[in-house]
Image (cartoon, rainbow, N blue to C red):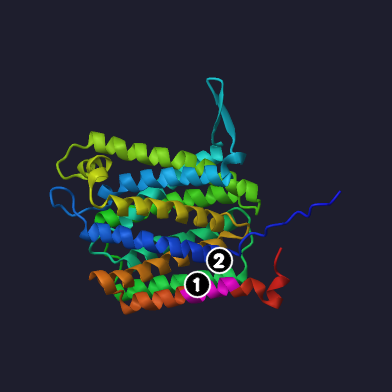
Amino acid sequence: MTRQRRIKIEPAPIELVALSYLLSYLPYVILTRYLATNGADGDGHALTGLHILPVMLISAAISTYGFIWISGWGRGMHRVRVAGLSLPGATRATMWSGLCTVLVLTTVPLSYTFRDVSIPFMQLLMRGDILIIAPLVDVMLGRRVHWWSWGALMLVALALFHTLSARGGLALPPLALITLIIYTAGYFGRLWVMTAVAKDDDPARLRSFFSEEKLVAFPIAILSLGVIAWVDRTPGGAGAQLLWGFTAAWHSDHLPAMVMTGLMVCATGVFSGIILLDGRENSFCVPLERSASILAGVFGTVILAQFYGGKWPSGAEFIGAALLLIAVLLLSVGPRLPFSQRSLP
C-alpha cells in the first residue's frame, strides 16, 4: 500500500498578511471618501457616513458570513440548542468582543466623511491612541514587550506628534471627537478580550474567535442603526440619513460603490483579525496593523487628489507616513536579527 504524504501548509508571513490588509483597505478608504464628497441622495443632498453605513454593513455581513461558511472557519464555533436545533453561538468572551466590534464597525467609515478633516490626520489620531493602549494591555495581562515593539511604538508616536504639531493641535469637529472616543473604547475592549482568551497562535482558536465575534457584531450594529432610523424623526437628522440608507440607497446609482465598501470591510476584517490574534505581543501586532491602515489612508488621499480633485496630504502627513514605513521595517527585521533570537520566548 502506498503511503500518502501529508503536506503541511505553513501560515503566511505576517508581513504578507499586513500587505494584503493594506491593499484591501485602500479601495475601502477611496470609495468611502469619494461617496462622502461626490455622492448625493435623491434630493440632491450630499451623502454622509450615515447614508452609507446601512448598505455597507449589510453587504459586509453577508460577505463575511459567506467567507466563514466557505472557508470552514465556523466549524469550531460553540453551539447552542434552540428549539431542538444546534445553532452556532458565542461564548461570553466573544460576545463582549463582538459588542466592542460594533463600536469599531460604525465609527471607522464615519471617520472618512468629515469634510474639514483629512483622512491621514483622522487615521493618525484613531490609530495613534490604539498604539498607546497596546503596551498597556500587554503589561496589564503579563505579556512581554520586546525592544523592536517599543521602537515601533515610539516611531508611530513621533509621527502622530509631528502631524499634530504641524496642524496646530487637535481642533476636531464635535462629531469627529465623539467618533474618536467611541472607536478607542471599542478597540481597547476588543484587544483586552483577544489577548486574554485567543492570542496564542492556535489557528483553530483564531478562526472560531473571529467567526463568533462577527456573528455577534454585525446583527447588533445593523439593528442599532435601524432603531435610530426608526426613532429619530428629525428632518435631515441622523435618523433620516440612516433611513435613506436602509431604503432609497438600494435604488441609488451609488449602490455598487456602497456594496464594494462592504466587501472591503469583510476583507480588512479577516486580515486584521489574523494580525491582531497573532501570538506575539500587542505592541508588535498593533503597530503593524495600524501602520498598514494609515499608509492606506495616505495612499488613498493621494489617489483622490490626483484623479478626483481631492486635497493633497500635507508635508507633515507625508513625513508621518515615512516614519510609519520605518516602523513596519523595524517590526519585520527586528525579530530576525541574530542577537534578537536569544530574547524570543
Q: Is residue 244 left or right of residue 264?
A: left
Image height of 14 relative to 198, above or below: below
Q: Identify which residue is drawn at 28% across, 50% down.
A: 255
* Quadrant in the picture for residue 12: bottom right
**Picture coordinates of residue 210 (x, y %)?**
54, 46
Residue 102 got which mark?
none
Q: Main secondary structure of the magenta part?
A: helix
Q: Is residue 87 left or right of residue 186?
A: right
- Magenta span covers which residues? 325-332
- Residue lying farthest to the front in this orientation: 1
- For mark 2, does the 10 Å Cα neighbourhood hold few (<14), some (14 to 19), or many (20 or more) residues? few
- Which residue is under mark 2? 16
Q: Identify which residue is drawn at 32% across, 46% down.
A: 55
- Residue lying farthest to the right in this orientation: 1
Disc 2 element: helix
In the picture, the quarter occupied by the C terminus is: bottom right
Q: CA distance from mark 2 to mark 1?
A: 23 Å
Q: Is residue 81 left or right of residue 167?
A: right
Q: Identify which residue is drawn at 66% across, 51% down.
A: 202
Dots 2 and 1: beta carbons under 8 Å? no
Disc 1 element: helix
Front in this rendered view, residue 137 or 304 = 304
Q: Is residue 112 visible?
A: no
**Picture coordinates of residue 164 (x, y %)?**
34, 71
Q: Amino acid at mark 2?
A: Leu
- Which residue is under mark 1? 154
Among numbered discs 2 and 1, the one appearing first in the sequence: 2
**Picture coordinates of residue 11 (x, y %)?**
64, 59
